[in-house]
Amino acid sequence: VQQKARRNDLAKLPDAAERDRLYQSYLQKLVLNDVDQADLINRGLSKLEIKHLGAKSIKSGYILPIKNPQGKILGFQSRLRDVDSGRYRWHKPFGISAQQQNGELPLAFHGNIQVDCRRVVLVEGTGVKPYLASKLRGCAAIGASGGQFVASKETLQSYFDALGAKPELTRLEYAIDA
C-alpha cells in the first residue's frame, strides 16, 4: 500500500518538459548579485560562462540549473553563502520535490551529444564541477549530488543512451574530489 501511494505521489510530479517551463519562468525573475558572481569567478568561470550556465542569486546563496542532455531544466541545488559545512541544498521552487517522476534525483549534464561517444566523465556535484570537467576534458560530463550515481541508475542509463555511449566503445572516467 505504501509503495503504491509513493508511486502515485511521484506520478503527480511535473515531467521534464513541465519542470523546464516552470523553472525557465522562475529564472527570468532572478538576477545574479556581485558577491555570488565573484564566487563563481573565483571558482574558475568567466562572466560569459556564468551567464550561459544560468546562475542566479537567491536569499541564501546562488543556484545553477540542473539540465538533462536535451537541455531541459530538471531542478536546482543551491550553494549557500555563509556556512562552514553542508554548503549545498536542494532548491525547491514552487515546493516541487527534487525527485523526478521515476523517484530518482536529477543528474546534471554538460557537453555535447556525439554519434559514438568515446568518453564520459562522472563528477561529484551538479553545479560548476561537471561543467568544468566537460570543458577541461573535452567530453560530456554527468554530475550527481554527493557523487550518488547509484541513486539515479535509470536516469544515468537514459543519459548514456542519449549520448550514444556503449560499453565496448565508451570509457567512463571518474573525477574524484581531493
Image (cartoon, helix red, strand yellow):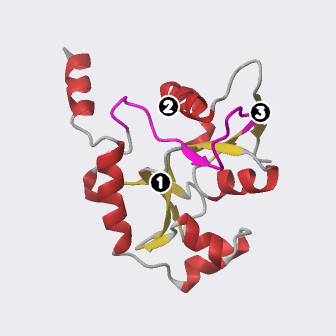
- Please indicate whether residue 24 sits to the left or right of residue 167 in the image: left
Q: Where is residue 93 in the image (x, y as percent from the top left)?
A: 31, 58
Residue 40, x across and y down, in percent: 64, 72
**Residue 82 appears anywhere in the view:** yes
Amino acid identity at mark 2 = Thr
What SS does tag 1 mark?
Answer: strand
Query: What separation in Å lies between label 1 and label 2 (alpha carbons)?
Result: 20 Å
The residue at the point 57 percent across, 82 percent down is 35
On residue 155, the disc is 2
Position of residue 141 measured from the top left corner of the image (x, y, whole percent): 67, 44
Q: Residue 159 carries which label?
A: none
Image side of residue 103 versus residue 53, left or right: left
Q: Which residue bears the numbered disc 1?
A: 89
Q: Quadrant of the N terminus?
A: top left
Dot 3 or dot 1: first in sequence order is 1
Q: Name the residue beneath numbered marker 3.
A: 118
Q: Would residue 107 be counted in the magenta stretch?
A: yes
Q: Dot 2 surroundings within 10 Å: few (below 14), some, or many (20 or more)? A: many
Q: Residues within 10 Å of mark 1 (few under 14, many from 20)?
A: few
Quote the CA–CA distance across marks 3 and 1: 33 Å
Q: What residue occupies the far top of the structure in this picture?
A: 1
The residue closer to the viewer here, 31 or 36, is 31
